[in-house]
Image: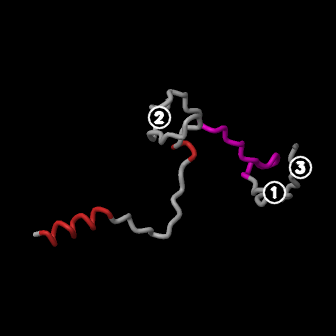
Amino acid sequence: MIIRARTDIEANNRQPEDTGAASEVDPLSVCTQCGAQLAENANYCSVCGVKVEPPEEEPIPTCGQCGAQLEPNANFCNQCGSKVPPAAE
């Protein structure tokens, strides 16, 4: 019985095995004020009370001629072949 109890204790003390996959943390899942873990659809942090603001998304560039979505750093539209004007900085 002592051997069984020791085995149970050792099993409980083991760390979870690393699967090799890097754990990615969704930027919205961590409070920007205090670093606390946020619930999936949280509007406010449950630890510090700060309002959770979603990051502003950059607009997806589209072709001025045909409206197709442009590839990043495209010089020409891959749908209609129109020249893409340089991005304003």
Q: Which residue is mark 3?
A: 85
Task: Count residues near mark 3 (Cα–Cα under 10 Å), then give few for <14, some for 14-19, many for 20+.
Answer: few
Which numbered disc covers residue 28? none
Q: CA distance from mark 3 to mark 2?
A: 40 Å
Q: Which residue is mark 2?
A: 42
Label 1 to label 2, Cα distance in Å? 35 Å
Amino acid residing under circle 2: Ala
- Nearest to N terminus: mark 1 or mark 2: 2
Q: Is residue 13 above or below residue 42?
A: below
Residue 40 inside the magenta-drawn segment: no
Dominant SS of magenta comes to loop
Taking the spot 47% from the left edge, 34% from the top edge, the residue there is 42
Q: Position of residue 54 (x, y in %)?
A: 59, 36
Nearer to us in this view, 12 or 76: 12
* Number of the front mark, 3 or 2: 2
Crowding at mark 2 (Cα within 10 Å: few <14, some 14-19, many 20+): few
Front residue of 62 and 34: 34
Instruction: Say how the picture is coloured.
Output: secondary structure
Residue at 58% x, 34% y is 33
Which of label 1 and label 2 is nearer to you? 2
Rendering coords of residue 19 (x, y %): 45, 69
The stretch in magenta equals: 54-69
Camera-near label (1 vs 3) is 1
- Label 3 residue SS: loop
- Which residue in the structure is indicated by mark 1? 73
- Crowdedness of circle 1 by 10 Å Cα count: few (<14), some, many (20+)? few
Residue 56 is inside the magenta segment: yes
**Badge 1 amino acid:** Asn
